[in-house]
Image: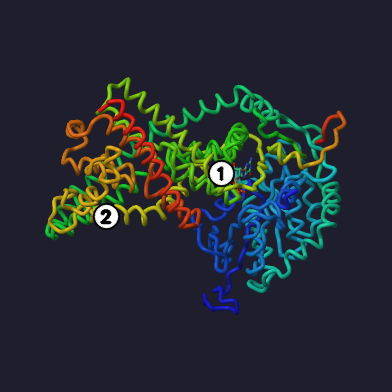
Amino acid sequence: MTHCLDATGLVQVHGQATVAVLGMPNTGKSTLFSQLTAAHAHIGNWPGLTVDLMQAELTLEGRNVQLVDLPGIYDLRGHSEDEAVVRRFLESTPVDLVVIILNASQIDRQLRLALQVRQLGLPALLLLNMADEARRFGVAIDIEELERRLALPVLLISAKYRQGLAQARQAINRELAASEPGAGSGVRDLEARLAAADADRAAAMETILDAAVTFPAQWRDALTRRLDRWLLHPLLGLPIFFLVMALMFQAIYALGVPMQEALVALIENLSLNVLTPALASWPSFARGFIVDGVVLGIGTVSAFLPVIFLFFLAMGVVEDSGYLSRAAFLMDAFMERLGLDGRSFVLSLMGFGCNVPAILGTRVMRSSGLRLLSMLVIPFSLCSARLNVFLFMASVFFSPRQGALVIFGLYLLSFAAAILTALLFKGRFASEEALVLELPPYRLPTVLQVLRRAWAEVRHFWFWARRYIIFGVVAIWLLNNLPLGVAPASAASLSGRLGELLQPVLAPIGINPRLTVALVFGFIAKEIVLGGLAVIYGQSAGHGALGHALASEVSWVQAVSFMLFTLLYTPCLSTVAVIRTESKRLGFTVFSVLWSLVLAWLVSFCFYQLAWLVGWR
Amino acid sequence: MEPGLGHRLEALGIKPGQQVKVLRRGWWSGPIHLRVGMTELMLRRVDAARVVVLAGDPSPVNP
Ligand SMILES: Nc1nc2c(ncn2[C@@H]2O[C@H](COP(=O)(O)OP(=O)(O)OP(=O)(O)O)[C@@H](O)[C@H]2O)c(=O)[nH]1
């Protein structure tokens, strides 16, 4: 295979055909893509477009094919960001075949997209997915008639249940065989051509549908109807939803935390029993750097993985079943008044597990104002890592009953901070987005499907997160151990000096220099706050020794102030990193971090000073 | 009507002459739940207000 640069500067690979997968949202495009490509897909920047597209190189019946997954779009003439991306892609890339994927049971409206592609004269193949649902709902499609009228090959498949996939592969291959790879060019005058054909399209669609499709006289999805009667019930809908969510978090927490602890223990073991002896001959600074810096960094990232995996597993089930769209329906009225919408609510809830996947989830939003406001609000969700710190502090400073109240109060504050933030900034991040969401029929997710999805998410997380977190952990380690020869995290170290330096700001909220260093640790990840305190106080967190050392130096009022601050300031470096990559705006990322710091300081200040006035010490 | 919304609604099946069935309304003036052809949608009332609907005939909605 040879590479050469064509006139536009793009690298073209000879002998490889480019196949683009195009479809409406929610038609099973991703499902089909992963079925066709197995594990070969990767997300990468598409040359000439500044967006990431899912791509895979595969051999289809002996032919080299590059498969590209385009974003799901409703309309080639639409105004959303995704729709513009697809247009630019089609204009700039010579595609050998467009695989159009539509939901067979909704062909009554989705056929429009196929007609648009045909009007552009692109070589195309139409896959009607969800054949199972079409059958269930009584939509009968005369494939031959449809093929004849569209002058396109048409196949009825069911990606989720792996039906018709072999035929789809053969059909793709057949179409490619009929054309010379790389012979085409990008579409010219795309918008003008579509606009010109607009008027005829509606009529053409009527005619084709009349001739080739029979719809049921009566709506047949009794299951969805019956479930919606309860799950969207005006009074019971929300309580049922909260109950389901509570159970889900319970399950994630109950399973994930032991897995996380086991993983951390494993890594600690390896580093203590394998790595440390292996590096015994190294100078101590270099050894410390590797063991307590780099390895701790990797350990911190990996510790996230089990919870993230379970989290996406649970979310996958909720989402694939169709319940998530119902949650958006239920909460939209409230969220609308905060300048957000039903989807932001769902994502904030996800944030109570871990903020990172929740922020990734804002991709479903098209309006940038709405997306940014959601990203500003989500980090206030009290994630499980912060809960760890609070459980520890509460057990040290309060009786069990008081402790439970304190934690409950922190949850309330977490909601209050999110609501306040939305109310304050909804004007700045106004959304012009009209909320029109599909409520798909209820579906039973398959085990394989949710497992595969969760796995893909974990891989994705690992890919980007390790760079940022490892960098951060190494930086903290250096702060604690420089200048050379100081006791780690002591007053003479850089972080100790930082603690002193910040006293004018942090003393008024009751945070002493040692707690300041712990907060600096917490900026990396709340998971290492306890470990950080242990290093600082020179006591192990395990056996109550740290608790005693802490309680002898810090009052309960200071402890609460510390918890308030920990709840509200930047959740972790991963969250900052994901806000940066998702918003693509440095300024917004800085603003989000600063706002959380300011709010955290103000709340802690009010609490600490009031407590002081009242005489609590 | 905002230009994007018209296109979006049409792509979701709400086009001139189309029958629309309202399945339910959300609490606290929340969104409405619609059935259009073979698709179910939620639509905020403010957005729905921009669509002109003629009172439907009471015969069963088809499909
Ligand atoms: N019944 C049925 N459901 C399917 C089939 N293929 C996919 N699905 C389900 O349809 C839903 C949407 O599938 P995705 O693959 O996420 O769809 P998509 O087109 O990539 O959607 P976007 O990510 O929104 O663009 C999922 O819940 C799938 O499980 C099928 O053949 N039959």
Tell me, yes or no, if residue A452 can be seen here. Answer: no
Instruction: Report the chain holding disc 2.
Output: A
**Which residue corresponds to mark 1?**
A426
Q: Which residue is drawn at 67% across and 50% down?
A: A24
Residue type (three-letter) at the residue carrying disc 2: Val
Residue A579 location (% of width, % of height) = 46, 51
Identify the mark at residue A385; answer none if there is no mark: none
Residue B21: percent from left, percent from top? 78, 33
Q: Residue at coordinates 65% horizontally, 27% vertically from top-left? A: B27
Q: How crowded is mark 2: few (under 14 residues within 10 Å), some or many (20 or more)?
A: many
**Is A175 left or right of B52, judged from the image as shown?**
left
Q: Circle 1: is it few (<14), some (14-19), or many (20+) Cα within 10 Å?
A: many
Residue for badge 2: A294
The quarter of the picture where residue A345 lies is: top right
Indicate the quadrant where residue A54 lies.
bottom right
Q: Which of A518 and A560 is in front in this view?
A: A560
As shown in the figure, which amino acid type bears the numbered disc 1? Answer: Lys
Which x, y percent locates residue A370? 57, 47
Q: Is mark 1 on a helix, strand or loop?
A: loop
Q: Are marks 1 and 2 in contact (CB under 8 Å)?
A: no
Chain of the residue under the numbered disc 1 shown in the image: A
